[in-house]
Each structure stands twice: as structure tokens, then as C-alpha cells.
Image: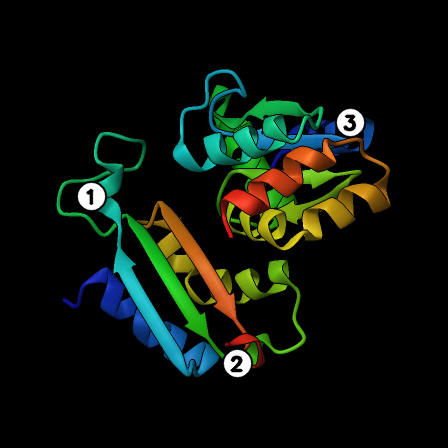
Amino acid sequence: MPGIADSMRSKLETALSPIRLEIVDDSESHRGHGGYREGGESHFDMEIVSDAFNGVSRVARQRLVFDALKDELAGPVHALSLRCIAPIELD
Amino acid sequence: MTDAIQSQIKETVDTNDVVLFMKGTKHFPQCGFSSKVASVLSYLSVEFQDVNILESEEMRQGIKDFTNWPTTPQLYVKGEFVGGCDIVTEMTLSGELDTLLKEKGVTFDQEAANKVREANS
């Protein structure tokens, strides 16, 4: 069975065709806090650059991500820290 | 989704200028993300109502349904959903939060907001 990060990557690639997609498992820094699980894959940091974010509000961008990952968020994933960037906003 | 909890949430965001749905309370946050947003608001001297979603399972689920947003914290200003920790942080650093608070007529400490940006630039 593929890991949660891999499965989220594949769903985001399908939904958003990202130009850049970084997924970092940050679970270890939440050890002992709510939602932490041995083995990690509960807290993730993501940076996503996608044309899908062009002209879209911050809230709506995150909703696009949440919609793509609703199964993970309803289950094993406790927290996502998101940076959703439109290509035009890159330095 | 129970109607009672949805009405209760609606009333809370309609009758308080600024509401933070969070894990724990502003004085005793129980999650790093909630703590961060509460700290920003406090630092900016924004008066806000905190709602501890851990107090009941109904509220915990109810706020997710109300906003159609899967995570907490959730910040509301004048009945409007602003975002969670990432969005509030980004908006604080970009100055958009200042603009929003001004537009909505919510009092905050402009000097403190400038200081946050200086410290993070």
C-alpha cells in the first residue's frame, strides 16, 4: 500500500496539475501533541504552485486542496500547513 | 449535522465582531496552530471571542460543517470566514489583515502590526 504522502501527491497532481509540489511530513515536530501518531504521516507541510490558483482567493485555493484530499483529511491526516501559490506570484 | 449547533455557531459569528474557533482557549490553547492565531490577535490588541471546539463533539464537527473547512483554527470577522492559521499568518505579514480589519471597522493596534512585519521581513 502506498504511503499517505504518495497518495496525496497523486491526487493533487490529478486535481491541480501543479508546476511544483512539495510535501513534507512534519509529524515529528508535533510529537506529544494532538493528532500525533507513531510512524508519522499525520501532519504535513505543503507548497503547491499551480495555474489553478490564478485569480483565486486564499480561502478558495485551500478549498481546492481540501476537496482533493477529503479522504485523507477525514481520516489519517490531522493537519495540513499550506502554501498555495499562483505562478505569477513567484519571485 | 444538528441544526441546534449550526444556529448556535451562526449566532456566535453574527453577534461577535471577531470569533476564533480553536482547540483550547485563548488563555490555554491546546494546539500550536490555534495558539499562533490567538497570539497574533492578542498581540494586535484585537478583541475576540474564543470558542473551544474541544468542549463538545458536536461543536468539533459542527464548525467543520458550518464553514465547510476541515481544520481548526477558524477565524471569523463580522460574520465572514477569513481563514485558518496559514491564511491569517500570510495576511498578517502582507498587511491584508490590517486592510480587512479597517474595512470591517475592527479596532487593532497598527503599530503592533507594523512591528510584526518588521520582525519578519
**Is A1 on the left or on the right of B14, as rendered?**
left
Mark 3 and mark 2 on one chain: no
Q: Is residue B94 above or below residue B56?
A: below
Q: Nearer the viewer, residue B85 or A8?
A: B85
Pick the quarter of the image with the N terminus of chain B: top right
For marks 2 and 1 on the same chain, the one whose residue lies earlier in the sequence: 1
**Is A24 on the left or on the right of A81, as rendered?**
left
Camera sees residue B3: no
Q: Which mark is residue A85?
A: none
**Which chain is disc 1 placed on?**
A
Residue B83 horizontal/vertical position (percent):
61, 48
Camera-nearest label, 3 or 2: 2
How far separated are the C-alphas under marks 3 and 2? 37 Å
How far separated are the C-alphas under marks 2 and 1? 30 Å
Q: Which residue is mark 1?
A: A28
Residue located at (33% from left, 50% from top): A77
Q: Which mark is residue B16?
A: 3
Q: Which residue is mark 2?
A: A87
Q: Secondary structure at mark 3?
A: loop
Q: Amino acid at mark 2?
A: Pro
Which quadrant of the figure has residue A45? bottom left
Camera-nearest label, 2 or 1: 2
